[in-house]
Image (cartoon, rainbow, N blue to C red):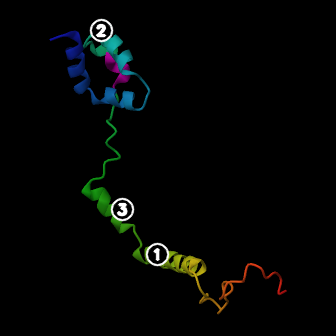
């Protein structure tokens, strides 16, 4: 197996190193250079070991249940109703024809002739 293939296998077995690359804290080239000089030497890789893997963000059924318990459906319904009212008002203002809000006409019902200015 070539040195390059050995390095690929080494990286596959060290997911914490991949996190450094994803977070742009280190480059793959930098890790390869360390591997080229030190190989699998534990002392060389200790500075890059993380005590816990970043699995804290993974949602498991317990976390999902806790999130669902904290959701207030009445508040969500109020927000949905408010949004629907706002959309209804926008729709009323943007539709052509007369407005249903206060029976105010949105514009002239018949278009003005082009040659008629200021009620001439």
- Rounded to the nearest angstrom, the CA distance separating label 2 from label 1 is 59 Å
- The numbered mark, 3 or 1, whose residue comes first in the sequence reads 3
**Toward which corner of the image does residue 5 lie, by quadrant?**
top left
Left or right of 114? Residue 35 is left
> Which quadrant does the C terminus fall into?
bottom right
Bounds of the magenta span? 45-49
Query: Label 2, label 3: how many angstroms apart (C-alpha)?
Result: 47 Å
Query: Who's the residue at 23% across and 26% down the image?
Result: 12
Q: Position of residue 38 (x, y in %)?
A: 30, 8
Q: Is residue 57 left or right of residue 9?
A: right
Most extreme residue toward the bottom is 103
Q: Is residue 16 above or below residue 32?
A: below
Residue drawn at (31%, 59%) of the image: 64
Disc number lying in front (2 or 1): 1
| Percent coordinates x, y for residue 14 in the rendering | 26, 26
Q: Is residue 44 left or right of residue 105?
A: left
> Residue 92 shows which numbered tag?
none
Indicate yes or no whether the magenta region holds residue 48.
Answer: yes
Tell me the quarter of the picture where residue 54 sits: top left
Foreground tag (3 vs 1): 1
- Badge 1 is on which residue? 80
Residue positioned 31% across, 57% down in the render: 63
> Which quadrant holds residue 1?
top left
Q: Which mark is residue 67?
A: 3
The residue that mark 2 highlights is 36
């Amino acid at each position: 197996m070539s040195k390059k293939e050995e390095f690929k296998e080494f990286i596959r077995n060290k997911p914490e190193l991949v996190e450094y690359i994803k977070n742009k804290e280190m480059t793959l080239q930098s890790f390869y250079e360390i591997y080229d000089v030190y190989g699998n030497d534990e002392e060389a890789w200790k500075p890059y070991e993380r005590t816990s893997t970043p699995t804290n963000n993974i949602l498991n059924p317990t976390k999902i249940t806790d999130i669902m318990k904290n959701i207030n459906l009445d508040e969500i319904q109020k927000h949905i109703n408010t949004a629907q009212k706002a959309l209804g008002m926008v729709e009323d203002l943007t539709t052509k024809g007369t407005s249903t809000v206060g029976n105010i006409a949105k514009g002239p019902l018949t278009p003005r002739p082009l040659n008629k200015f200021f009620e001439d």
